[in-house]
Amino acid sequence: MEGIEPRNRDVYNPVEEVNTPTFRPGESPELSEPLSNQAEKSAEQPDTDTQSAEDTITIPEKSHEPSETDGPPSDLSADNSPRVSKDTVPSPKEDSGESIGESGQTLPESFETKPPEPSESPGPTPPPPQSSEDDVNIVNPYVPYTYEQMKDESLKLAELYPDIITLDSIGSSAEGRELTLIKLGKGDKKIILCGSHHAREYISSSYLMKMVEEYSKAYSNSGYFGKYNVREILDKICIYVVPMVNPDGVNLVNKGLAAVNNKQAVEAMVMMRSSYREWKANINGVDLNRQYPAKWDEKYDEVGKPASESFKGAAPGTEPEIQAMMKLSRDNEFILAASFHTKGNVIYWADRGTVGLIPGVKDMTKKLAALTRYQNMPVSEDPSIYGAGYENWFRLEFLRPAFCIELTPYNNTDLPHDDKKFDSLVWKNAKYIGLFFADEALRRK
Ligand SMILES: [Zn+2]
């Protein structure tokens, strides 16, 4: 993601910072570069904070929130060595302004204690005896996730849970990979969740896939996931999940240049970071969360041409992935939307352009923050920073709630996390988010 760099060191985990990307046989040699880059970054940004994320997932304090300094840096235009610039200046995106988050804020009544503990047993209804389905785990989020894995697991989930999962496609990526849509639920009402607009944030894809599996499993078994009555909720609503908006970029990150059709084109693009493990854009070098026709003209672009990140495109909506997301969103009356990114454990819930036009979002965000222990960010004030993201476009287009959720603790590197730590980095805090939004959506209408 963007815009929430060192300020989130309250959740900085030094163990994560030194994690070594997991490589597979046959991956290209570029993938070995990140470690040196990490060392360089550490030297540039010494950090004495030795707290671990495990210890510090609490309602964050105001002192850790972003400031107006998140705005576009004025000296970047003259600097053609973007890696240096990007390493020293926080990357802009959503920013600042007043905050709704307060240290020691009162938690809503139903969330006064820790989020409900695992799902399998605690509902009012005792769980049935173990069936063979209880032991089935199709989704494996503990490895660097790829398009092929997502496709394979989607098919298997649909096969195992045919009464609750339907697969569809919303179009194709720049390289022709299918943009998979998973419809989870039976209801007429709909919400949309999407992941991996940004390639290196692919853990948002494995997260959504894990969510689909666990909710389906709960639906088929006890009917409860934590305190949520999954069966009742999913009988009334359908959760549309686009787990991987940017499959070409994700595969570049996790399979290297060998996975790319037009290698020369990619090699010619500006590298804002040192390795393909840190690639963020789609395979055309366009940053997909700077592409939507919502204040696009005002959106800041520090590179201006195809690059591993930050290029907003020659015009809004040029990329096939964005066109597919826009069409899907226009063709369905989604009550709300959530787009998942990393890193930061924060919730962007409003921008200045629409905050007064979409009621009820502030309260919803407070409840979500209490449920996840994520920080609710201030209203994004500056279109040059917040403009052109999916959530911004959705708010502007439909005047309905849309959230940008940064999963995972910030860890002072742009490399992906160690996927083996998926449970503690992502799932522990985020497993109820889909049901939370479904439940909130049902309350709205
Ligand atoms: Zn992102």
Image: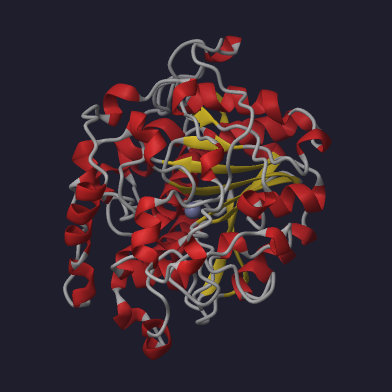
Q: Which residue sits at x=41%, y=43%?
A: 5
Q: Quadrant of residue 128?
A: top left
Is residue 221 left or right of 355 when viewed as pictured? left
Q: What is the x, y in percent for residue 91?
A: 47, 52
Between residues 371 and 268, which one lies in front from this camera angle? 268
Specify whether residue 333 is in view: no
Q: Is residue 110 positioned above or below 215 on the image?
A: above
- Where is 164 relative to 365, above or below? below
The residue depicted at 49 percent of the width and 15 percent of the height is 103
Instruction: Give residue 120's position: percent from left, percent from top.
Output: 40, 28
Q: Which residue occupies the foreground of this view, 311 or 117?
A: 311
Name the image quarter holding the C terminus: top right
Percent x, y of residue 199:
43, 63
User: How many labels sit on residues?
Assistant: 0
Could you tell me residue 406's position as x and y percent? 48, 42
Tell me the residue at 45%/23% (across/down).
63
Q: Nearer the viewer, residue 41 or 210?
A: 41
Q: Quadrant of residue 31?
A: bottom left
Q: Quadrant of residue 15?
A: top left
Q: Residue at x 56, y 50 (%)?
A: 93
Whether residue 143 is visible, yes or no, is: yes
251 or 103: which is nearer to us?
A: 103
Q: How is the image coloured?
A: secondary structure
